[in-house]
Image: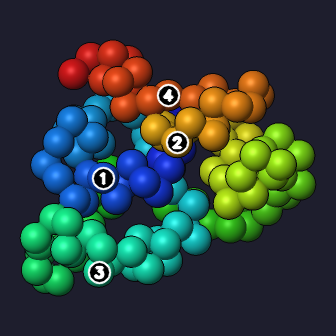
Amino acid sequence: MNIVLDTNILISALIKNSLTRGIIINSSHNFLLPEFELEEIENHKEEILEKSKLSKEDFYILLFDLLRYVKIIKLDKIINYRQEAYNIIGNIDEDDTIFIATALAFDCPIWTDDKDFKKQKIIKIYSTSEMKEISGL
């Protein structure tokens, strides 16, 4: 099953060797991440380094390792869904539009612990605890 990753899920996996990281690495699901969100991770790099106590080198090693389990989705694959996505979540959190657009483009759920996503009723949302259950981990 394809599942869109919220950036905060990937950031969580970078910060701590936890259930989140384990699900990404050990799950049989196909995780999708809009390419634009790689910039978001880079923008939060210093915060991630501080919280994780990783060196820059180890940060990039871990990031590239985690990205082996993630398909990066080019903007041109989801751009046609942007307006529909905005109509679904734009009045809740405009920044989440790209994740909804990706979910619409690939007809799949989103993995996030951001409660704003649950305020919409069009796209299925899985929390980390729900992902643990459906991944059988």
**Pointers 2 and 3 in contact (CB under 8 A)?**
no
Res. 110 image quadrant: top right
Which numbered dot is residue 46? 3
Question: Dot 4, crowdedness within 10 Å: few (<14), some or many (≥20)?
Answer: many
Q: What is the spatial separation of the Cα atoms under label 4 and label 3, in whole angstroms?
A: 28 Å
Which of the labelled discs sits on residue 114, or is there none? 2
* Mark closer to the chain start, 2 or 4: 2
Disc on the earlier residue, 2 or 3: 3
Q: Position of residue 65 (x, y in %)?
A: 21, 62
Disc 4 versus disc 3: nearer the observer: 3
User: Of marks 2 and 1, which one's residue comes earlier in the chain?
Assistant: 1
- Tell me whether circle 4 and circle 1 mark residues in contact (CB < 8 Å): no
Say whether disc 4 or disc 1 marks the residue closer to the N-terminus. Answer: 1
User: Is 81 above or below relative to 2?
Assistant: below
Seen from the viewer's position, the closer of residues 96 and 77 is 96
Type of the residue with mark 3: Glu
Q: Earlier in the sequence, mark 4 or mark 3?
A: 3
Which disc is residue 126 wearing?
Answer: 4
Disc 1, SS: helix
Which element is circle 3 on?
Answer: helix
Q: Is residue 33 above or below residue 27?
A: below
